[in-house]
Image (cartoon, helix red, strand yellow):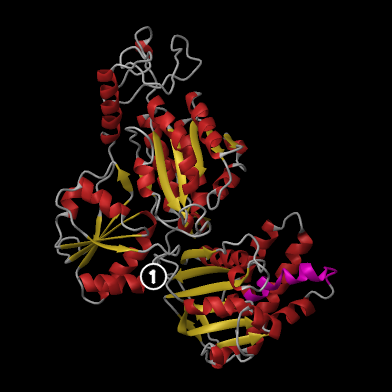
Amino acid sequence: MANNLQIKNLDNVVVRFSGDSGDGMQLAGNIFSTISATVGNSISTFPDYPADIRAPQGSLTGVSGFQVHIGAEKVFTPGDKCDVLVAMNAAALKTQYKYSKPNATIIIDTDSFKQADLQKAQFNSEDYLAEMNIDPDRVVACPLTTMVKDCLKDSGMDVKSILKCRNMFALGLVCWLFDRDLQIAFNFLKEKFAKKPGVAEANIKVIQAGYDYGHNTHSSAMNVYRIETENKVPGRYMDITGNKATAYGLIAAAEKAGLRLYLGSYPITPATDVLHELSKHKSLGVTTVQCEDEIAGCASAIGASFAGALAATSTSGPGICLKSEAMNLAVILELPLVVLDVQRGGPATGLPTKSEQTDLLQALYGRNGESPMPVLAALSPTDCFDAAYEASKIALEHMTPVVLLTDAYLGNGSAAFKLPNLSDYPAINPPYVPEELLGKWTPYMRNKDMVRYWAVPGRKGFTHILGGLEKDDKTGAISTNPENHDLMCRKRQEKIAKIQVPDLQVEGDKDDAELLIVGFGSTYGHLHAAMDEMRKAGKKVALAQFKYINPLPKNTSEVLTKYKKVVVAEQNLGQFAGYLRMKVDNFVPFQFNEVKGQPFNVSELVEAFNKIY
């Protein structure tokens, strides 16, 4: 580092990479977040994909973004606005500048701001900075494309392949800006392109060139920053997405239970990565089947469950609609099944690459008949591991299908994940039929917790048939008796109600808060950050975030009725608030609802909550 440059220490910083959907912004952002996680920083990321399959190059609808928040201590969100914006073309600057802070550093590729580029981005003049009221002193304008071509002119690569390396130049420049060790990036690329060493070497050369450009130019718009984590928790870490963490959680549960894992799935955004990840782990006893449709994915998983596997099926909201009949079959069969719903914007095709919490009531009630089913909602990308493990444990130990709600924000977002020790996780004990019941057992015989015993095919003396028609409680034979049907509905409901879940935890000023913030699932980080901001301003505020939706924690009513004012914040039009009003007598909360397909904005939350306070 040059002697005349001063390295400034920061507590946290937000960087947003943006460009055309073919510019590799997701890869650049992933590598930068991996570097940061590896050196011990806390991270939270938000990939913001365009909904178009492939929008015209340079168009406003084709911009892809990746935002990463890096902190010396724990960070809860990807940040409202960025301190550094990388805009690889004119459309990226036009659409992404609104996500930057007033004093943000902006890095642009001047080669992608020609007249044709400006016209595609709907600029009215060639002075695009003045048109957007951007201070030129905050802009690092470099001929990035030209420099990449010069860097790789002797590589033997064609022009198209060379241009694919532009993202690495931007990454190298950002790595210089934050005093990052490039060797971690080099190792990442060597592993990613292990079968294409020439591509790896070209990208490594370009990253180094970007780093050197920052080092050699010392632009007045730039300072060198360092985010140093002092209180590091020892352990092995990785940068993990929520979808990958979910996959690992399912594998861990199967291992703990001593079962094979089966996933029946049909590709759908944003859940497909779970299928992709699990398909890589046949050596761990994982079987994946890409089925012809959503119904087949769920039905095949039910068959695997009947055969004695930990069975799962993965989808998004539209797929839950299609799977609902098969999910109902799992309810009446009383077989274990994990149903993963990575929620996205709806209705219909809606916003397939965006995130919402709008499937809650569908998960709870979107089936015919009395069809009770446990519902869990993961709190963060890393919590997806624990949530998947817990969903599997509930499914196996209580012989029931379980819905696990994540969403696009969690599934595609990432955080630093400390690799867990499986021995620290609770045992999973499926209720197999005891041998002493041989000769006495019938298919719907239950234990003390109302859980039907599991007779895995192949056990002599426990041959049986299950089906979608109602069965007699005593014999397991088909029954249309009214009293028996009423009894079976009540027993299935009681079984779910008896599931023991942890008490609801309250954070912040839990003893004397003037306002309790309530949320569920993926909004945890943003609501926690909003609470922190209000407490810093001297307000008495607490937060209760629900992970267990059905059954609710036993202390739910006690917590929700304790505080003077309660606001329920969710990314839908009030589904969770309505559910809580139904479950808790005299509970009339304030509500904060948004359905924008984007994560909450912390500053907007604070403004809204202050009006309620």
Q: Quadrant of the C terminus?
A: bottom left
- The answer to whether residue 585 is above or below residue 323 is below
* Residue 232, percent from left and from top: 43, 64
Residue at (27% x, 38% y) in the render: 500
- Prevalent SS, magenta region: helix
Above or below for 407 versus 458: below
Q: Residue at horizontal 53%, vertical 36%?
A: 295
Q: Which residue is mark 1?
A: 601
The relative height of residue 68 versus residue 422 in the rendered view (above or below) is below
- Callout 1: 10 Å neighbours few (<14), some, many (20+)? some
What is the quadrant of residue 294 in the picture?
top right
* Circle 1: residue type: Asn
Quadrant of residue 523 within the rendered picture: bottom left
- In front here: 280 or 333? 333
**Would you say 456 lies left or right of 60 here?**
left
**Farthest residue in the top direction?**
439
Range covered by the magenta-colored residues: 155-170
Question: Can residue 501 be found in the magenta stretch?
Answer: no
Could you tell me which secondary element the residue under label 1 belongs to? loop
Question: Residue 578: where, in percent of width, then height?
Answer: 26, 52
**Disc count in the image?**
1
Q: Residue at x 14, y 56 (%)?
A: 562
Q: Position of residue 152 (x, y in %)?
A: 79, 74
Give the residue at x 51% y 74%: 15
Left or right: where 437 falls relative to 229: left
| Residue 159 within the magenta-colored segment of the rendering | yes
**Nearer to me, 263 or 239:** 263
